[in-house]
Amino acid sequence: MNTITLPDELNLTPSVSIAVFDYESNTEIDKQQVLLNKNTFSFLQEGSKEVFSNNSSYAIDNTQFLLMKSGHCLMTEKLSNDSKFYRSILFFFSEEDVLNFIRKFELQSSKTKKFYSTYSFHYDVFIKRFVNSLLDISKLSKTIQTKILKTKFEEIMLYLIEQKGVDFLYSLINNNDNQTQKFIQTIESNRLTKLTLKELSFLSNMSISTFKREFEKQFHSSPSKWFLDKRLEHSAFLLKNKSKRPSDIFEEVGYESLSNFIQAFKTKFGVTPKQYQSS
């Protein structure tokens, strides 16, 4: 699967840092490799969306919208059941825009040590009006758009800070230069997502061969064995703490049949799932 680079492939003016694009589609995509060259709001209007990044993943419908940090991600877009249509208003802005915003409003640094590449928010009346205003602005001349959108960027950021605090904002400028730490975080965050090695390699910005070498160096195990162990550990948690039946969870933890799951569970834990649950 080819990688899509956004917003470059939307034919927006390259020199403009803040831009809006009304994206519509009647074709579904599944885990499309996307390189975001800018931070992006995805104001979902029709359909549903799923995004995997290096340290977070979200599945949303059109009651929610996403804020995504620039970088590598995997994106799934599904059409709405009613209109058979997908639509998202994309609002792009640069890291420099974020830094200028922080300086202008003299914001205090976040105390959190947990930074994420993607955040999900629910729509409210204010946000819905804001998105409608973006659509109105997108119909104006490019010169006027550029001037107004700078103000609209400040508007949405000030509103979200008032509602949610500043953690999400500082995540957008958090550049973790420790590549090993980033790699480990990518693996740990996606241990239950059932992504392929190719998809995990893309999120890690590595070739598959480099990914395998780095994985074995950091985790002292092959990827297949490590992920298998993590999913079996998760299945044990579901059996013991969530009172789930083996037949309810074998697919969730990556097995095609109940019998294969029971055999793998017994190999790891020495007892069958039912025996483990009743012990």
Image: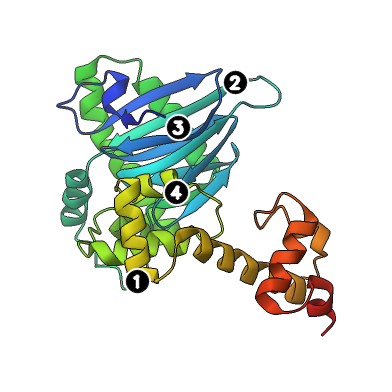
In the visual, does 108 lie left or right of 234? left
**What is the secondary structure assignment of the residue under circle 3?**
helix
Indicate whether 125 appears above or below 147.
below
Q: Residues within 10 Å of mark 2 (few under 14, many from 20)?
A: some
Q: Earlier in the sequence, mark 2 or mark 1?
A: 2
Tags 2 and 1 touching, CB below 8 Å: no
The structure's colour scheme is rainbow
For residue 152, say whether it is visible. no
**Cα gap from disc 4 to disc 2, whole angstroms:** 31 Å
Which dot, 3 or 4, sits closer to the camera?
4
In the visual, does 98 lie left or right of 66? left
Q: Earlier in the sequence, mark 4 or mark 2?
A: 2
Q: Which residue is mark 4?
A: 197
Q: Which residue is mark 1?
A: 112
Which dot, 2 or 3, sits closer to the camera?
2
Amino acid type, label 1? Thr
Instruction: Give the number of the disc on residue 85.
Output: 2
Q: Report the number of discs.
A: 4
Q: Which residue is mark 3?
A: 131
Indicate whether 114 appears above or below 34.
below
In the visual, does 176 lie left or right of 103? right
**Cα gap from disc 2 to disc 1, whole angstroms:** 39 Å
Amino acid type, label 2? Phe
**What is the secondary structure assignment of the residue under circle 2?**
loop
